[in-house]
Each structure stands twice: as structure tokens, then as C-alpha cells.
């Protein structure tokens, strides 16, 4: 799929084209260090207009489902009641009590806003939900009408990951990353034994072991074995392992992983605590086109050595081991983000027998079988079956289920429909609950997402359909569009022209610019490219520096994340 095909209509194509050109320009600016030079020559009002123009364009559709393509990202099953399922997606939380016969939408007005590409969701026994928001972890119990904060650190977006503790049905382990002026990040672990109601004081992971944590997992067959993936102080990929529940640690290199190929724990084999699967998140240039290059890495010795099993020019968004541990499934998909292109023929579901992997990890890719064609954005495999997040536009349904993975490309329909977005309805809650506004809130509720999902916006046959959420809705943080510009067409055309001019101008001035990432001296009020992570551009409010190098932005700063097309207002 080319970037122009992601939108689906003329305006979306304009917006996508503007975004793709802007992203390419920003990459050139980062490599040539020209943004500070141009920014220094701009008047303060000009800088504000640039930020406002970008924000206005990006915000044209952010009122509806964060402005992102509708996509399921994580699916969970209640082990105490398999009829109870939950899906977290770019459109909010979806729940069912009848194994998919009916689904209800729980909006961000209740759960809290979250615009990241790695949502956290756990469904504990008795229908207890824990999920991520931009303030931390929030929780509720089915039917998910009342929500409360569970773990909300002082700085936003500090909860990096959360996983179940296999030693306790109500246990959770959270990985925290908080910016630190002296070392960049402080990585720590915190535990809960009561489904997130209370948490232990966080215990810091030594920076010599791990400088920036990304994911955490606990071995089901050895609960005292804890794994962390992340980066060391040199920004190289590293796996940290503890055999005493986090008291002491060892660290091992993850070959090839680093700041441009981030390592994430995919799963620890439930039957063998030494078998670890790691996926990488990478973007690389292929014939002048930015494309994914996500890989699967495998370790049979607790992370001491790794083998790169395979990679594809698509995003590795789903991974699952069969309950008996005999089969590995990889789900490659297209998140439909404006910043890069996915090869459609490389998306799909791939099957690998564990015996083939164990026998010859280096050549296991030759045994890989593609058994399903189409985008796969999440996987979950339990004793009750295999679940997959798919693409409604491709399959006619958003999520499907199968008894197992013993099917092939020749099968007409591998998955039985589980979720049809068009059949969604808003969750009905009492007026006294935090989710009561979901049915009517124009910014974060059902009116903001129903059109994008293709669902019926009217709550009942007697209710008039609400106004489309794109018509001048605000962001809740002061970012608004005048009604006559609500379709975004003028901004899209203007930004296309602006980026074209800026690109031509930048090439003639690139030799004059200081390099921010080398620490060259530049005024603190310029727009900067911050090294961690490389694809963020921070519009400065309160930039914390050390030795002339940018470290992080305090919560007041506005953060523009290109790969998510979202303007954050923390």
C-alpha cells in the first residue's frame, strides 16, 4: 500500500501526501541538522504559526478515534469466563459478555485518553480490567462503567508496560520509565497483588543493567524469573534477567537491536523459562521508500544468546504460542500510519513448528508457512481457541476466531467473524458512573467514533443521529478548528505547498546548520530533534538540557509524534 492509499478519500489523500512529505522532510532535517537553522531565522510568531498549521492539519480528524485508522491492537480473554472478552483499539475499549454476539464501546471519556501505538490491557479473573491511559493505569470491572486511577505517576506516559504475575491470579508487574536529568531515564518495577488497587514502592533497575526499559515479562513456569528488554546507556539493545523477582540482575546483548531497532519481549514460553521470543520495531529505507523491517529473535538459553529467525517488510504486531507450546504464530500487519509504507504481500499469519525452531534456529525461516493472507494486528491463543485482530476493510470483520491454527491459504475462511465494527453500540451506564457520558460526549464518546467505524450513530431508533464529530469539535486541550476549515482541505493544500518550499530552502542551507544530536550549541527555544526516540519532534515549552544536549520535555510541553499523527497536550 502506498501512503496515498491509506486515507480512502480525496481529503485523506491530501492529508496523507502532506504528512508523507513532511515526515520525509523531517528525516532529512534530522540527518542534515537544518531545522534549528531555519527555526532560528523564523520570528516567534512564525514559529507559532508553523506549529499551529501542523497541529490544525493533524487535528482535522483527531476528535474521532484520535484521528487514526480504526484498528484493533490488543485482545484479551477472561480465564474465569471465556465468554468475556475485551479489545483495545485506536477507537477505544470494546467489551463483550457473550463471546462476541454483541459488543459495547467504552469511550476515552471514561478510560482516559491514549494515543500510543502500544496500548496496555489486562483482563484478570472476575472481569477486572486494567488498561493504559496517558496518565498511567486505570481499572474497572465488567461491565466497565466505573473507572478509577490505579497507578498514575507524577509524569504522564511513565508506565511503559504491565504484565500478569503467574504466581498470583490478581498479581501485576508494572515497568516504569521516568525521565531523569542526570541519566536520561529511571527504570523501575512496581508490583500489585490485588489487581492494581495497591502497589509496592517502585524498585529501581540499575542503570548499568538497563538504561531504558521497554517491556517486562514473567516466566509462567518460574515466577521468580523476570525479563526486561530495552536499551543500555550506549543505546544498544539489551535483555535483563532476574532469578530472584527483581532483587539482582544480569544483562545480555540483543544483537542488531538498538535505538533504531527497538527490542520488545513477545513472549516467554510457558513451559520453558529459558525460551524467549523478542520482536523488533524497525523502519528502514527500501528503494527510497521508508518501510518496516520487523524481525523475530529467539533465545533458548535465557537470553544469553539470540538467533534472528526472520524479518518482513511489515509490522510484527501479533505473536502467539499454542497452549501446548508446539506451534509459533507470527502476525504481520499494516497499522495504516502515514509515515511509512507496508508491503501488502508480506502481511498475514505465519506458522512455525516449535520443533523445527529448536532443532535449527538459524534455518527455521525455511520451515515457515504462510497460512493466512491479510493484515493481522494482534493475536491471542488460549485453551478456548485462537483470536486474531484483522482488518474490517479486507475481511468484512475486525476480529475473528478459530479452533486452532491448522488451516492454510487454500481455506476459504480461516476465521469465524467475532467482531463487526458496524454492529457496535455504546455501553449503557447509569448517570452516576464515569462512563455515562460515553453515549453523548461529542469529543471522546460515541458521537466521535461512530462514523469512522461505520456504525449507526443514533443510540435508538427515536434518537437523531449526532453531528459528525469532525465538524469543528475541540480537542479538550484548546486545539480547535474554525467550522469552515473543519474538512482540512485548505490546510492540507497549504501544508503540501509549505513543505515543498521548506524542503527546497532547507537543501540550500543545510551546510550552515549546527548538529543538535552532536551537542552543538543552539538557542534553547528552537524546535529540536531529540535522540530518544528519533521519530519524535518536540515543540518546546520547558526543555530540560544537560551540557547543551536536550534530555526531555517537561509535561507542559506539547509533543508531536509523527508516526501517530497526533498532537498531545499533556
Image (cartoon, helix red, strand yellow):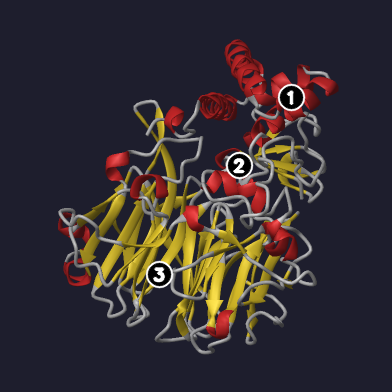
For label 2, the SS is: helix
How many numbered marks, from 0 up? 3
- Whether the residues at callouts 2 and 1 have beta carbons within 8 Å, the answer is no
For label 3, the SS is: strand
Residue closer to the observer: 424 or 27: 424
Q: In this view, does 120 lie to the left or right of 269?
A: right
* Residue 40 in the image: above or below residue 314: above
Question: What label sits on residue 484 in the rendered view?
Answer: 1
Label whose residue precedes the other's in the sequence (2 or 3): 2
Q: How far apart are marks 3 and 1 (CA)?
A: 49 Å
* Residue 143 in the image: above or below residue 502: below
Residue closer to the observer: 507 or 136: 136
Residue closer to the observer: 90 or 8: 8
Label whose residue precedes the other's in the sequence (2 or 1): 2
Identify which residue is drawn at 53% across, 88% down. 169
Report the residue marked by disc 3: 267
Residue sitting at the far front = 462
Identify which residue is drawn at 58% across, 14% down. 500
> Which numbered mark, 2 or 3, is in the foreground of this view?
2
Residue 318 in percent (x, y) is at 39, 59
Q: How far apart are marks 2 and 3 (CA)?
A: 30 Å
Q: How far apart are marks 2 and 1 (CA)?
A: 19 Å
Question: What label sits on residue 158 in the rendered view?
Answer: none
> Is residue 255 visible in this depiction of the protein?
no
Residue 85 in percent (x, y) is at 48, 72
Report the residue marked by disc 2: 67
Q: In which quarter of the image is residue 501?
A: top right
Amino acid at each position: 500500500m502506498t501512503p496515498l492509499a491509506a486515507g480512502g478519500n480525496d481529503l485523506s489523500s491530501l492529508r496523507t501526501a502532506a504528512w508523507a512529505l513532511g515526515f520525509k522532510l523531517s528525516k532529512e532535517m534530522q540527518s542534515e541538522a537544518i531545522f534549528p537553522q531555519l527555526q532560528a531565522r523564523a520570528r516567534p510568531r512564525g514559529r507559532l504559526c508553523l506549529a499551529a498549521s501542523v497541529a490544525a492539519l493533524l487535528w482535522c480528524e483527531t476528535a474521532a478515534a484520535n484521528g487514526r485508522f480504526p484498528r484493533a491492537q490488543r485482545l484479551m480473554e477472561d480465564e474465569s469466563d471465556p465468554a468475556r472478552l475485551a479489545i483495545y483499539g485506536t477507537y477505544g475499549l470494546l467489551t463483550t459478555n457473550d463471546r462476541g454476539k454483541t459488543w459495547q464501546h467504552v469511550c476515552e471519556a471514561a478510560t482516559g485518553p491514549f494515543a500510543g501505538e502500544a496500548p496496555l490491557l489486562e483482563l484478570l479473573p472476575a472481569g477486572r480490567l486494567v488498561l493504559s491511559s496517558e496518565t498511567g493505569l486505570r481499572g474497572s470491572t465488567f461491565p466497565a462503567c466505573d473507572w478509577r486511577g490505579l497507578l498514575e505517576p507524577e509524569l504522564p506516559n511513565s508506565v511503559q508496560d504491565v504484565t500478569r504475575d503467574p504466581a498470583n491470579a490478581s498479581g501485576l508487574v508494572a515497568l516504569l520509565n521516568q525521565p531523569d536529568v542526570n541519566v536520561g531515564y529511571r527504570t523501575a518495577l512496581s508490583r500489585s497483588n490485588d489487581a492494581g488497587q495497591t502497589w509496592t514502592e517502585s524498585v529501581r533497575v540499575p542503570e548499568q543493567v538497563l538504561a531504558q526499559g521497554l517491556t517486562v515479562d514473567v516466566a509462567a513456569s518460574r515466577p521468580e524469573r523476570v525479563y526486561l528488554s530495552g536499551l543500555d546507556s550506549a543505546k544498544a539493545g539489551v535483555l535483563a534477567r532476574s532469578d530472584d523477582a527483581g532483587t539482582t540482575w544480569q544483562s545480555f546483548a540483543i544483537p542488531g537491536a538498538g535505538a533504531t531497532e527497538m527490542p520488545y519481549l513477545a513472549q516467554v514460553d510457558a513451559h520453558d523459562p529459558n525460551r524467549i521470543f523478542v520482536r523488533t520495531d524497525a523502519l528502514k529505507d527500501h528503494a527510497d521508500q521508508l518501510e518496516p523491517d520487523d524481525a523475530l529473535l529467539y533465545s533458548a538459553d535465557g537470553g544469553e544468546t539470540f538467533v534472528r529467525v526472520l524479518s518482513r517488510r511489515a509490522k510484527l504486531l501479533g505473536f502467539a504460542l499454542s497452549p501446548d507450546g508446539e506451534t509459533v504464530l507470527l502476525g504481520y500487519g499494516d497499522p495504516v500510519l502515514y509515515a511509512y509504507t507496508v508491503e501488502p504481500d508480506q502481511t498475514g499469519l505465519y506458522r512455525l513448528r516449535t520443533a523445527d525452531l529448536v532443532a535449527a534456529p538459524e534455518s527455521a525461516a525455511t520451515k515457515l508457512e504462510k497460512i493466512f493472507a491479510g493484515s493481522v494486528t494482534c493475536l491471542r491463543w488460549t485453551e478456548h481457541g485462537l483470536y486474531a485482530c484483522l482488518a474490517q476493510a479486507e475481511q468484512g470483520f475486525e476480529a475473528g476466531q478459530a479452533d486452532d491454527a491448522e488451516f492454510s491459504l487454500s481455506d476459504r475462511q480461516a476465521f469465524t467473524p467475532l467482531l463487526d465494527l458496524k454492529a457496535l453500540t455504546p455501553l449503557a451506564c447509569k448517570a452516576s458512573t464515569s462512563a455515562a457520558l460515553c453515549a453523548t460526549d461529542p469529543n471522546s464518546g460515541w458521537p466521535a467514533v461512530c462514523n469512522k467505524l461505520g456504525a449507526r450513530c443514533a443510540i435508538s431508533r427515536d434518537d437523531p443521529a449526532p453531528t459528525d464529530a469532525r465538524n469543528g469539535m475541540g480537542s479538550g486541550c484548546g486545539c480547535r478548528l474554525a467550522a469552515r476549515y473543519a474538512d482540512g482541505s485548505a490546510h492540507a493544500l497549504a501544508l503540501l505547498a509549505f513543505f515543498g518550499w521548506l524542503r527546497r530552502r532547507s537543501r540550500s542551507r543545510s551546510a550552515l546548520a549546527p548538529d543538535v544530536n552532536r551537542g552543538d550549541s543552539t538557542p534553547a527555544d528552537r524546535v529540536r530533534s531529540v535522540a530518544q526516540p528519533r521519530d519524535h519532534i518536540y515543540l518546546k515549552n520547558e526543555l530540560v538540557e544537560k551540557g547543551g544536549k536536550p534530555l526531555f520535555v517537561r509535561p507542559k510541553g506539547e509533543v508531536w509524534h509523527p508516526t501517530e499523527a497526533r498532537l498531545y497536550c499533556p
